[in-house]
Image: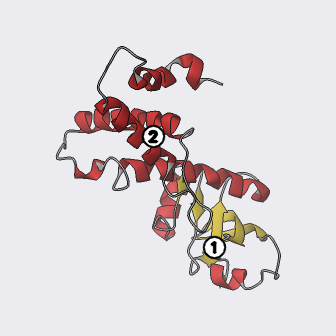
Amino acid sequence: MYADREFVGHDWIQGLAQKGIPICVRLRRDSPMDEWSAQDWLGRLQTGSAGLLVEHVEVYGQPMNVVLTFTPDGDALIIASNTGAVTAIQAQYRHRFRVECLFRALKSKGFNLESTPMTLHVIVERLLCLLTLTDVWCVLVGIPEICPNKQHGRRAWSVVTLGLRALVRAISRKVDHEEVPLLRLIDLFMPSKTHS
């Protein structure tokens, strides 16, 4: 299970471990690591070093391996895992960012799933599946779209936003006898295009 900083705490981590669920979680600076806090461990980072790898340390009562480093923005990045080698933890945790992008697209930065009045489990499940497919379609459409960069070097809009805008434009265009842009975008879902 990959989780961000809001999903930490002794009971939470113990519950996951007791159920045999593999854990890869980002910790807060005040999270306990043996007798110290994660902040204390961060203080041991050498200036200019890529990070600190700590093996077999107790985190919320569970033996874990921990990676402590800083993001390019200067934020502390502390990741603990009870599975795999300490050198593989960051690579494992990157999977969570993919899930985070999907959640962002499904929620307020995209499709506003949380605003649905639907409450029946089966209906919400179908809606979630439909929106996930829509998100994939938006990504496929948005990847080739040209996008300016902001001053910090990142794209001004996400791939999902670019794809959604392109789909809306294609759907709202008047159909004539020339090539229909929407049909070209629908073709992106064909197995020959989605499998590499």
Q: Position of residue 185 (x, y in %)?
A: 45, 26
Q: Position of residue 65 (x, y in %)?
A: 71, 63
Q: Quick check: 32 above or below 108?
A: below
Viewer-nearest residue: 141 or 109:
141
Q: CA distance from mark 2 to mark 1?
A: 27 Å
Q: In the rendered image, is residue 129 in sight?
A: no
Callout 2 secondary element: helix
Pair 2/1: label in front = 2
Q: Residue furthest top?
A: 177
The three-letter code of the residue at mark 1 reads: Asp
| Residue at image location 35% in from the left, 36% down from the top | 169
The three-letter code of the residue at mark 2 reads: Gly
Where, by quadrant of the figure, is residue 52 drawn?
bottom right
Circle nearer the N terminus (2, 1): 1
| Residue at image location 57% in from the left, 38% down from the top | 144
In screen coordinates, is 179 left or right of 125? right
Q: Quick check: 128 above or below 14?
A: above
Label 1 sits on residue: 73
Label 2 sits on residue: 163
In screen coordinates, is 87 left or right of 28? right
Viewer-nearest residue: 108 or 162:
162
Q: Position of residue 127 (x, y in %)?
A: 29, 36
| Residue at image location 36% in from the left, 14% down from the top | 177
Q: Quick check: 188 above or below 1?
A: above
In the picture, the quarter occupied by the C terminus is top right
Viewer-nearest residue: 146 or 30:
146
